[in-house]
Image (cartoon, rainbow, N blue to C red):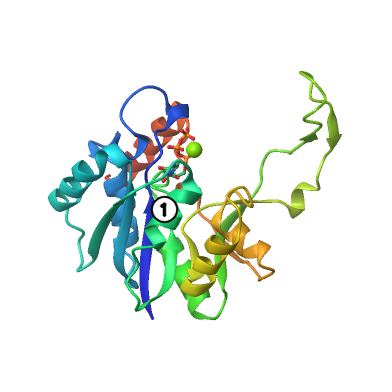
């Protein structure tokens, strides 16, 4: 089955601090987005990459991808993104050719995901799962608070950590299932794509995530990413 990767990259990166849109900031001298595209293109299954760019940067992203062609014969399409991540994913799904049957959705902000993780996600979708998510055990204890409880946010519960998983991307989907989930569900129905599929009442399968698939969110994450890249280049 033909597989495409949709890469939402239209965010500005507010938590990273002032500067260019996050996906365009350099990592080892190369824009984060280029690393993310390569990470998808390295997977043999991936035939097409759809980059969802910041609207003001769509032309710049197009030339950037032309300057950094992927190693294998992977088609690259650029579309302008929306105001939220979910909207950006929807805009990416809208341009998929009809023959695509499996879709990976991968954050540009996770540029260092290893190819083995991508392959494991694709394999689980091929094996019949409508939605597949790479996940790792949670290492911090997590508290649930009373959001209406004022500044002190009193703790109301401590969920059993052994039952919690932190999820990453790429998340992999049967194409029709993901499109249906995005079409049917409201913008605030879930905070990830697999969450939308869950809302349809369909099973979501986990595969092992990877430490190096962490999301670059805050400045310290960039320090870690540079260190991971430097270690790979040894
Ligand atoms: N994203 C997107 N369109 C948006 C918002 C986010 O395509 N309107 C993408 C980001 O580019 C990123 C991924 O969704 O690759 C995950 O989002 P996040 O890490 O939150 O990135 P930003 O939204 O850019 O960062 P911040 O929330 O700190 O502004
Ligand atoms: Mg965000």
Side (left or right) of 145 relative to 233: right
CA neighbours of label 1 inside 10 A, class few (<14), some (14 to 19), many (20+):
many
Side (left or right) of 192 relative to 213: right
Q: Considering the numbered disc 1 on the image, is that residue within a helix, a strand or a loop?
A: loop
102 versus 134 height, above or below: below
Quadrant of the rendered image containing residue 228:
top left
| Front residue (pair 45, 1) | 1
Quadrant of the rendered image containing residue 64:
top left
Write down the residue under mark 1.
113
- The residue located at (53%, 52%) in the rendering is 168
| Front residue (pair 40, 95) | 95
- Residue farthest to the left, as pictured: 67
Q: Is residue 137 visible?
A: yes
Side (left or right) of 33 relative to 211: left
Q: What is the x, y in percent for residue 178? A: 52, 67
Q: What is the x, y in percent for residue 130? A: 56, 73
- Residue farthest to the right, as pictured: 156
Side (left or right) of 199 relative to 216: right
Dividing the image into 4 quarters, which one contains the N terminus?
bottom left
Quadrant of the rendered image holding ligand 1: top left
Q: What is the x, y in percent for residue 21? A: 34, 33
| Front residue (pair 211, 24) | 24
How many numbered marks, from 0 up? Answer: 1
Q: Is residue 106 visible?
A: no
Q: Does ligand 1 reach within 8 Å of label 1's beta carbon?
A: no
- The residue located at (35%, 73%) in the rendering is 45
Dividing the image into 4 quarters, which one contains the C terminus?
top left
Q: What is the x, y in percent for residue 155? A: 83, 30
- The residue located at (53%, 61%) in the rendering is 182
């Amino acid at each position: 089955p033909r597989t495409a990767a949709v890469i939402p990259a239209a965010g500005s990166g507010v938590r990273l601090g002032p500067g260019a849109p996050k996906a365009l900031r350099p990592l080892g001298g190369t824009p984060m987005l280029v690393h993310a595209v390569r990470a998808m293109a390295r997977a043999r299954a991936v035939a097409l990459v759809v980059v969802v760019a910041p609207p003001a940067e769509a032309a710049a992203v197009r030339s950037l991808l032309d300057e950094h062609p992927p190693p294998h014969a992977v088609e690259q399409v650029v579309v302008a993104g929306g105001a939220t991540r979910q909207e950006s994913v929807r805009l990416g799904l809208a341009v998929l050719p009809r023959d695509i049957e499996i879709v990976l959705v991968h954050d540009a902000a996770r540029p260092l995901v290893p190819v083995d993780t991508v392959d494991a996600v694709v394999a689980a979708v091929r094996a019949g799962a409508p939605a597949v998510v790479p996940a790792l055990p949670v290492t911090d204890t997590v508290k649930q608070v009373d959001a209406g409880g004022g500044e002190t946010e009193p703790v109301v519960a401590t969920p059993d950590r052994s039952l919690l998983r932190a999820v990453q991307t790429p998340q992999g989907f049967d194409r029709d299932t993901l499109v249906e989930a995005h079409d049917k569900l409201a913008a605030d129905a879930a905070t990830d794509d697999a969450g939308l599929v869950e809302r349809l009442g369909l099973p979501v399968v986990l595969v092992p995530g990877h430490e190096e698939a962490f999301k670059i969110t805050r400045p310290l994450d960039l320090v870690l990413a540079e260190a991971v890249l430097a270690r790979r280049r040894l």
